Amino acid sequence: MKKVRIGAAQGFYGDTIEPAVSTAEKGNVQYLCFDALAELTMAILVKDKKKNENAGYTKDISLQMKALLPYVKQKGIKLLTNGGGINPIGAQQEILRVAREMGINGLKVAVVTGDNVIDRLPEFLEKGYPLKHIESGEPVEEIKERLEFANAYIGAQPIVKALEAGADIVVTGRTTDTAQFLAPLIYEFGWGEEEWDKLASGVFMGHLLECSAQSTGGNYSGKWWEIEGFDKMGYPIAEVSENGDFIISKVEDRGGLVSVDTVKQQMLYEIHDPAAYITPDVVVDLSNVKLENVRPNQVKVTGVKGHPRTDTLKVVMGYENGYAGQVIVGFSWPDAMMKAKKVDEIIRIQLERNGLNYEEVRTDFMGYNSLSGPLAHDNQSELNEVFLRMTVRAKTKPEAAKFSRLFPPLALNGPPSMSGFTGNAAPRALLGMWSALLPREEVESQIQVEVAEV
Amino acid sequence: MAIVKLKEIAQARSGDKGNSINIGVFAPNQSIYQLLLTKLTTNTVKEHFSGLVKGKVTRYEMPNILAMNFVLTEALDGGGSSSLRLDNLGKCFGSNMLRMEIEVDDELLTDL
């Protein structure tokens, strides 16, 4: 019986490529699939593109291609990535350039476009689509003038088209995190557009693979100290059957653990209703999923159900939302916390006196409550050290920059043993996210797949 | 009866979507799952996260994997790229969930 083997290659922009190289070498896979994008990533890529018209894709694509193109050529492994970000054509050109530089030819590199809808927003509004915020219901007019990007989440079908056109590598923009993983299954098994259970199985497989080691023991909240090989984690591999059932494993000699528990933790990650996980291709129902340890480091997944896809696609828009200024300074025992609190008090008095009216001033005590906020409640009087972190929300960059200038004098003027000043970090642009729904045909009618050969 | 931190009897992982957070909570066996269904209600979870979560809490039950999925809205001070929080992606909500204190029959603890 035909099986398709797919390896996870990347869980986010900045991930290491080493595990994917191991999978290419020893994992016996036909496809390596990448998820390079997150809401925040799009914002970073927009900034890159503003500085340089040719940028706007995830820059690590060059290193990834250098590492993997030899396997594409020798073993026929296909690479599918949404690392095109805000500039998929730029990414395609970069992949072709790397191939030429390496002296590799006879490869087809496809690009999918049409997800970027920022220039079409006036048209959508004119047609009467309000693009209301999916959570709050607010009208998009509130932030329309401040938009930085707007991309529709598109599904696996355009990638399938690229594979049908013979592509060895497919690069896209905002295809969903799971689309790269589902597409090879539709292509290889010829799954129909209404075989909901199979499509749902493919999406769920992608969901388990798209965060790389998060299903092979990374970020595991159980007995994580018993997991071996964090220094060389293996990324998940799925072996999928025609009926959609699949087995998750990893390359044996890499670190990590594939167990019902490690897989289960990834199962609900960033999902809301597990009985209705909406994707462009299918609505996934995980209520009947069964996980089973079949062999060491092998978990079998069955029972995924699917329901008909919705008529809409989600559009995610990022808008400029002010600047953050931040300072971190440390204080040592004795009375570390008391000193930090005193400096917080001093700074707030100075803010008022200097007429710096920030929209928000936030204080965290790193080492005490910066990751748990009001939930921290253990003894704070005997801390060995604590770092005061203060952050402000400002309308403009210069306003945010003023904030950190208040701190250096306190090294001499304030409570004793203020140390570990990390320098004046440049203000960081804040970006609001706006998600809205749009009829799918508005986007899908504009999607294009183009293939170039090197 | 004993009072234990949820950490002693369950696992959790959290993630973000916009200004919302989801927390998957996983029980090691059926009896602890049944106990957690009574202890981890939308009200107790909302109460536990007061000060961090402004919106509402929804609970989805997943008896097939002995898990619950909690969705917390208005939980991230505006969402990942807009939040001033250090944990701007909500990765620590899972750990913070595990601080909850739960009253447990001693015999349930011996099974672990």
Image (cartoon, rainbow, N blue to C red):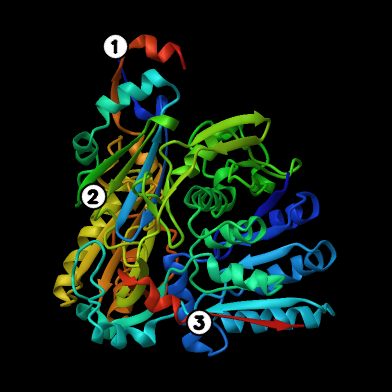
Identify the residue shown where x is 75% and y is 66%: A67
Residue B43: % across, % down: 18, 36
Give residue B53's mark.
Answer: 2
Q: Are marks 1 and 2 in contact (CB under 8 Å)?
A: no
From what the image shows, is residue A228 above or below residue B21? Answer: above
Task: Say whether disc 1 or disc 2 marks the residue closer to the N-terminus.
Answer: 1
Residue A277: % across, % down: 39, 51
Identify the residue shown where x is 34% and y is 59%: A389
For the C terminus of chain A, the quadrant is bottom right
Q: Is residue A355 left or right of residue B41?
A: left
Pinpoint the chain carrying mark 2: B
Pinpoint the chain carrying mark 3: A
Residue closer to the observer: B30 or B85: B30
What amino acid is at disc 1? Met
From what the image shows, is residue A136 above or below residue A211? Answer: below
Pinpoint the chain carrying mark 1: B
Give residue A48's mark.
Answer: 3
Secondary element at image label 1: loop
For mark 3, does the 10 Å Cα neighbourhood hold few (<14), some (14 to 19), or many (20 or more) residues? some
Residue closer to the observer: A111 or A82: A111
Disc 1 to disc 3, C-alpha distance: 58 Å
Q: Are marks 2 and 3 in contact (CB under 8 Å)?
A: no
The residue beneath circle 1 is: B1
What amino acid is at disc 3? Asp
Secondary element at image label 2: loop
Identify the residue shown where x is 17% and y is 74%: A357
- Counting labels gives 3
Secondary element at image label 3: helix
For mark 2, does the 10 Å Cα neighbourhood hold few (<14), some (14 to 19), or many (20 or more) residues? many
Identify the residue shown where x is 24% and y is 59%: A344
